Amino acid sequence: MTIYEIFVQMWVIDFEIGIFDKNYFQSLVKSGQLKVEDYKKVTGEAYVAPQDQPAQPATAPTTQHAQTQHAQA
């Protein structure tokens, strides 16, 4: 048995008794310390990678705002 396999067994117990939650194990997957397939062994659920939110595009000034800017000039 490898050290990694011992850690997985320990993490299963940690999760079962509530020491760590799913967010903790998701962070371990993201950092490469826990394999995706072992996330399911620990939590009982398949790992779903969080989706990055695209940056909001810059919005152009509204017509009313542009007219106000022009009128003040």
Image: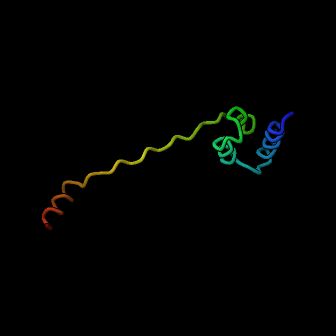
Q: Residue at x 71, y 34 (%)?
A: 40
Left or right? Give the position of 53 relative to 64: right
**Camera-side residue: 67 or 32?**
32
- Locate residue 17, reporting x and y percent: 80, 48
From the image, which quarter does the N terminus lie in? top right
Location of residue 7 (image quadrant): top right
Q: Residue at x 70, y 48 (%)?
A: 21
- Locate residue 55, reporting x and y percent: 42, 47
Can you say whether 5 is above or below 71 in the image?
above
**Camera-side residue: 62 or 52?**
52
Left or right? Give the position of 67 relative to 45: left
Q: Residue at x 64, y 36 (%)?
A: 47
Can you say whether 64 is above or below 21 in the image?
below
- Locate residue 39, reporting x and y percent: 70, 37
Instruction: Name the outermost residue toward the bottom.
Output: 72
Q: Residue at x 67, y 34 (%)?
A: 36
Q: How many marks?
A: 0
Left or right? Give the position of 50 relative to 1: left
From the image, which quarter does the C terminus lie in? bottom left
Location of residue 4 (image quadrant): top right
Location of residue 37 (image quadrant): top right
Colour mapping used in the image: rainbow
Instruction: Name the outermost residue toward the right.
Output: 1
- Locate residue 14, reporting x and y percent: 79, 46
